[in-house]
Image (cartoon, grey):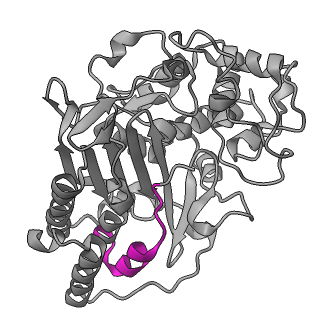
C-alpha cells in the first residue's frame, strides 16, 4: 500500500486504490436530497453507538499511510487528528516545531490557527446574541458611533458582506512603528481617522474579509469590557476544556514559548516568518493558538450545549450566499458545504505567517478532521480530500474530484 502512495501521480493513485476499496466493501452511494434540515445533528449517544472498532482500525491504517506519505514525499510538517462517531481514530505528529533547535512536534504543540480562529469569534458574538447584548442587525455605529461606514451590520461582518477594505493592507504605509503589536481598538481608530476606500457597497456581495472579523472581536471587547483573549478563555476555552489553547494579542509573549514556529521557504532552507509583527496583536480574524487534541475537544463541546444552544449553532452552519458556489458557501465563521445525500461538511482553512490549518466537522456522523501545519511552502493540505475519501469510501469519487477546500479566501 505504501508503495502505491509514493507514485508520482498521487491523486490518481489514491483514487484508483479507493475505487478498489469501494468494490471490496460494496457500499452504495447516497441519493437523498441536500436540504439543510437534513443537517441536524442526531443525538450524541445514538451516533457513538455506531462506532465500529474494526472499521476504524482499517481506516486508521490507511490514514497513517496517507499522512506518512504526505510528510515524506510532500513535505508535510505538522499534526493531524481524525475522528468519527465522536471518537478519535487517528492521531499523528510529523516533523519539527522549530527547525533550529530540532524540537519535534507533539500532539500537545499549539499552532497559530490563522483563519480557523474566525469560528471562535463568531461563537463569541453568538453567545452575546443569546444573552441579548448583541443583535445581528445592529449597526457598527451602535458600538463605535464615529465609525465612518454606514449600512454595515453585525450580520454583514459575520457573513463577509461588509465591503470594507482589508486592514492588513489599508494602513501599511501609515504605521511607522512596526515592532509594536496593534490592538483591535487602535485599528478601529485608524479606520475612523483615515477612512480608506471601500471595496464595494455593503451587503451587495460576498467577499472574504479579515476586517469584518477583527471588528467582531472589537465589538465583543466593547460590549463585555474584557480583552477578547480573556473573554474567549472564560466563555469558550474553559467550558470546552481546551487547556492548551489561548488567544495571542501581543500582550503576553511568554505564551509563545511552547508554540510551533511558522516557516516559509524551500524544503532545505526554511526561514521563520517574523515580518509584519505589528499585525500579531489584532485578533478575531486570527490569533487563536490551539492543538489538534484541543480542537477535538472543541468539536465535542459544540454538541454539548455548553457553548451555544443547538438552534443558535445551526444558524452558523446555514449557507448565507446565493452568489457563492456550494463548495465555498459561508455561514457565521464556518464555510458550509453539502455532500451527496445532504451530508453537511462544516469547515474552514487558515494561512498566516507560515501556518496552514484545516478543520472540518460533519454533524451527521460527528466526525472531524484537524490538520495543523507550521510550514506554508508546500501544497500538502490541498490533498486533504484524500483523507476525506478514506473516511467516507462510499463517496470517494465525490471527494477526490471536488475543488480544493483548504483555500483560505
Q: Is residue 216 visible?
A: no
Where residue 269 appears, as percent x and y from the top left, is: 24, 37
Is 8 located above or below residue 320 in the figure?
Answer: below
Residue at the (47%, 72%) spot, across then down? 402
Magenta region includes residue 392:
yes
Q: Residue at x 73, y 36 (%)?
A: 165
- Give residue 219's quadrant in the image: top right
Percent position (x, y) of residue 150? 90, 34
Would you place residue 361 above or below residue 291 in this image?
below
How far across and how far down the image is residue 115, in percent? 51, 40
Does the rendering let one see residue 163?
yes
Q: Is residue 260 above or below residue 92?
A: above
Q: Is residue 180 left or right of residue 202?
A: left
Quarter occupied by residue 89: bottom left
Instruction: Look at the image and give the residue range highlighted in magenta.
Output: 390-406
**Residue 35 falls within the magenta-colored stretch:** no
Secondary structure character of the magenta stretch overall: helix
Question: Depth check: 305 or 125 in front?
Answer: 125
Query: Measuring 39% from the left and 64% from the top, which residue is drawn there?
Result: 365
Tally of marks:
0
Location of the N terminus (image quadrant): bottom left
Q: Is residue 1 left or right of residue 323?
A: left
Residue 228: image x %, image y %?
57, 20
Front residue of 40 and 294:
294
- State the residue in front, 151 or 239: 151
Q: Nearer the viewer, residue 213 or 28?
A: 213
Classify 300 as above or below 117: below
Amino acid at each position: 500500500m505504501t508503495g502505491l502512495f509514493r507514485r508520482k501521480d498521487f491523486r490518481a493513485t489514491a483514487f484508483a486504490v479507493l475505487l478498489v476499496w469501494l468494490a471490496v466493501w460494496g457500499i452504495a452511494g447516497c441519493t437523498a436530497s441536500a436540504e439543510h434540515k437534513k443537517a441536524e445533528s442526531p443525538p450524541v449517544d445514538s451516533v457513538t453507538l455506531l462506532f465500529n472498532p474494526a472499521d476504524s482500525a482499517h481506516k486508521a491504517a490507511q490514514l497513517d499511510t496517507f499522512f506518512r506519505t504526505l510528510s515524506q514525499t510532500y513535505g508535510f510538517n505538522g499534526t493531524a487528528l481524525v475522528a468519527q462517531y465522536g471518537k478519535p481514530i487517528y492521531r499523528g505528529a510529523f516533523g519539527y516545531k522549530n527547525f533550529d533547535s530540532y524540537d519535534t512536534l507533539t500532539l500537545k504543540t499549539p499552532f497559530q490557527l490563522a483563519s480557523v480562529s474566525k469560528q471562535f469569534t463568531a461563537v463569541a458574538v453568538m453567545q452575546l446574541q443569546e444573552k441579548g447584548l448583541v443583535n445581528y442587525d445592529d449597526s457598527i455605529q451602535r458600538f463605535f458611533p464615529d465609525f465612518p461606514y454606514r449600512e454595515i451590520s453585525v450580520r454583514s461582518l459575520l457573513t463577509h458582506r461588509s465591503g470594507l477594505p482589508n486592514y492588513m493592507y489599508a494602513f501599511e504605509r501609515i504605521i511607522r512603528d512596526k515592532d509594536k503589536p496593534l490592538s483591535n481598538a487602535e485599528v478601529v481608530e485608524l479606520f475612523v481617522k483615515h477612512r480608506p476606500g471601500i471595496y464595494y457597497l455593503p451587503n451587495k456581495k460576498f467577499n472574504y474579509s479579515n476586517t469584518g472579523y477583527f471588528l467582531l472581536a472589537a465589538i465583543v471587547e466593547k460590549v463585555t469590557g474584557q480583552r477578547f483573549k480573556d473573554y474567549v478563555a472564560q466563555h469558550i476555552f474553559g467550558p470546552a476544556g481546551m487547556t492548551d489553547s489561548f488567544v495571542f494579542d501581543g500582550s503576553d509573549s511568554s505564551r509563545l514559548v511552547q508554540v510551533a514556529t511558522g516557516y516559509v521557504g524551500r524544503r532545505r532552507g526554511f526561514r521563520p516568518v517574523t515580518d509584519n509583527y505589528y499585525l500579531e496583536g489584532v485578533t478575531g480574524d486570527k490569533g487563536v493558538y490551539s492543538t489538534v487534541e484541543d480542537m477535538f475537544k472543541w468539536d465535542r463541546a459544540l454538541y454539548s450545549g455548553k457553548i451555544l444552544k443547538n438552534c443558535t449553532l445551526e444558524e452558523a452552519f446555514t449557507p448565507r450566499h446565493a452568489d457563492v458556489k456550494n463548495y465555498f458557501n459561508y455561514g457565521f465563521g464556518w464555510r458550509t458545504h453539502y455532500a451527496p445525500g445532504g451530508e453537511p461538511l462544516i469547515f474552514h482553512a487558515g494561512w498566516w505567517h507560515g501556518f496552514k490549518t484545516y478543520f472540518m466537522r460533519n454533524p451527521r456522523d460527528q466526525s472531524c478532521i484537524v490538520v495543523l501545519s507550521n510550514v506554508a511552502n508546500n501544497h500538502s493540505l490541498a490533498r486533504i480530500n484524500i483523507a476525506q475519501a478514506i473516511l467516507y469510501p462510499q463517496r470517494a469519487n465525490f471527494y477526490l474530484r471536488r475543488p480544493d477546500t483548504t483555500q483560505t479566501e
